[in-house]
């Protein structure tokens, strides 16, 4: 999905556009948010801990079931034209472009034994594409919420998480974990989603930056990335190798105190990868404790340490992300880190309200001086997860 994003369309205009396009009103509109991850990166597929939250920006799908097996998909984003497919003849790897996200959901539901008839779908989204804010999961979560209701499948949030992961892994071809869709489906206003990726247990942790006089800024570096590319899967493979050598089923089972011993057993690169995951899991737990005990103003050092670990041990940062983090920190942010899968996308900077403008200006100036594309900077607050909106 490399097209330029456009401004959000009000729901009534989505409905009237659906009517004009498909000749009848939709059965309803379902929306699902993108996410930022506060901390806990690449820990999800190691059965560890993550602390993301759902953002206000969301994908919206207007959907109407059909009485045949034809699926017709149209997006208001870019200029992509109508996509038609047969719901009864979907195969992994055969679909390209944005349609692979909704069709992957249909395929995964069918693999789970749920009969999905054809449908018409109109998509709109203001989750920036390729910015590391889970624009593709937002689409998948909006649609699975719609189809869960329209087909009467009665899936739980946990089941929808597993099915959207299956869509991503087996249909889209991105070997991702369960963090993004968990935030999108299970997010709540004013809270971060503390998720144990081993058993999907969720605790909602209050994250009220505003009350602490802070704002959480997202700095979209405009460096686009895809988790179907090699970097993400090679990190995942390193983690699996590390777990195998250390004799555990997942790196979740390695403690910080085991690292000394692990150093002697692993090659230097695998050790650095393992070191990131093990210390990052610990940082998530510390962040949750700190948020609960002292509030958002006290987690800055943990965010900084997370970024350093991703830059130096996991090696998934890039010059643009490092510059965004450095400039945010030296101009007032109390903590900053890249967020998401890495190799591009966005950084977050927890910033005192009075320093917000200075951080924005300094980052934009530094990007211009370095010859980088102008970043987009906006603030986010935790919002509700996927739901029907009309
Ligand atoms: C992407 C994946 C997630 C997770 C993050 C890294 O967003 O979709 O499953 O692995 O990267 O934390």
Image: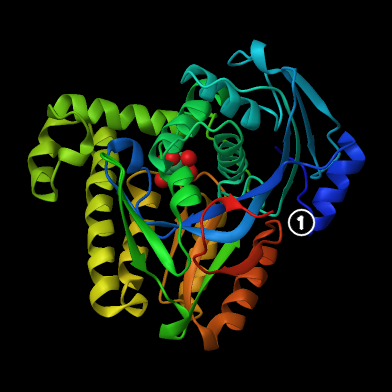
Q: Position of residue 332 (x, y in %)?
A: 48, 81
Task: Classify the position of ligand 1 by quadrant: top left, top right, bottom left or bottom right.
Answer: top left
Residue 370 shown left or right of residue 309 in the figure: right
Helix, strand or loop at label 1? It is: helix
Q: Residue at x 65, y 77 (%)?
A: 361
Q: Is residue 298 above or below residue 336?
A: below
Q: Position of residue 358 (x, y in %)?
A: 59, 82
Quarter of the figure with the N terminus: top right
Q: Give the residue pinned by disc 1.
A: 11
Q: Position of residue 53 (x, y in %)?
A: 45, 58
Q: Is any part of residue 386 visible from this angle?
A: yes
Q: Quadrant of residue 242?
A: top left
Q: Position of residue 319 (x, y in %)?
A: 54, 53
Q: How is the image coloured?
A: rainbow
Whether the residue under disc 1 has CB within 8 Å of ligand 1: no
Q: Is residue 291 above or below residue 80?
A: below
17 vs 221, nearest the viewer: 17
238 vs 193, nearest the viewer: 193
> How many C-alpha atoms fall within 10 Å of the one at disc 1: few (<14), some, or many (≥20)?
some
Q: Residue at x 23, y 63 (%)?
A: 286
269 vs 115, nearest the viewer: 115
Q: Is residue 198 above or below residue 110?
A: below
Residue 343 shown left or right of residue 117 in the figure: left
Residue 61 shown left or right of residue 359 in the figure: right
Q: Is any part of residue 9 visible from this angle?
A: no
């Amino acid at each position: 999905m490399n097209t330029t994003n456009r401004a959000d369309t009000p729901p009534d205009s989505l409905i009237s556009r659906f009517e004009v396009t498909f000749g009848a009103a939709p059965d309803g509109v379902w929306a699902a948010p993108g996410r930022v991850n506060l901390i806990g990166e690449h820990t999800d597929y190691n059965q560890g801990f993550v602390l993301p939250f759902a953002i206000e920006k969301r994908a919206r799908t207007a959907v109407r079931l059909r009485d045949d097996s034809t699926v017709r998909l149209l997006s208001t984003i870019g200029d992509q034209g109508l996509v038609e497919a047969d719901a009864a003849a979907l195969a992994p790897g055969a679909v390209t472009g944005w349609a692979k996200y909704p069709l992957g959901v249909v395929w995964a539901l069918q693999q789970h034994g749920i009969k999905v008839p054809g449908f018409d779908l109109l998509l709109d989204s203001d989750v920036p594409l390729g910015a590391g804010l889970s624009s593709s999961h937002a689409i998948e979560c909006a649609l699975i919420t719609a189809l869960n209701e329209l087909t009467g499948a009665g899936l739980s949030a946990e089941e929808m998480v597993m099915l959207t992961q299956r869509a991503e892994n087996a249909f889209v071809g991105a070997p991702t974990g369960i963090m993004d869709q968990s935030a999108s489906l299970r997010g709540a206003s004013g809270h971060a989603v503390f998720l144990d990726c081993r058993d999907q247990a969720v605790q909602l942790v209050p994250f009220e930056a505003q009350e602490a006089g802070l704002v959480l800024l997202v700095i979209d570096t405009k460096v686009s990335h895809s988790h179907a590319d090699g970097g993400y899967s090679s990190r995942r493979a390193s983690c699996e190798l590390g777990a195998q050598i250390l004799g555990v089923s997942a790196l979740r089972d390695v403690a910080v105190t085991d690292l000394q011993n692990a150093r002697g057993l692993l090659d230097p690169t695998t050790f650095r990868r393992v070191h990131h995951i093990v210390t990052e899991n610990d940082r998530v737990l510390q962040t949750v404790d700190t948020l609960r005990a002292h509030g958002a103003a006290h987690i800055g050092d943990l965010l900084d340490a997370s970024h350093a670990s991703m830059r130096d041990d996991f090696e998934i940062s890039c010059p643009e992300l490092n510059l965004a983090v450095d400039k945010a920190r030296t101009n007032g942010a109390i903590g900053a880190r890249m967020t998401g899968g890495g190799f591009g996308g966005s950084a977050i900077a927890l910033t005192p309200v009075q320093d917000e403008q200075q951080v924005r200006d300094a980052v934009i100036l530094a990007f211009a001086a370095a010859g980088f594309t102008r970043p987009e900077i906006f603030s986010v607050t935790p919002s509700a997860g996927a739901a029907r909106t009309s």
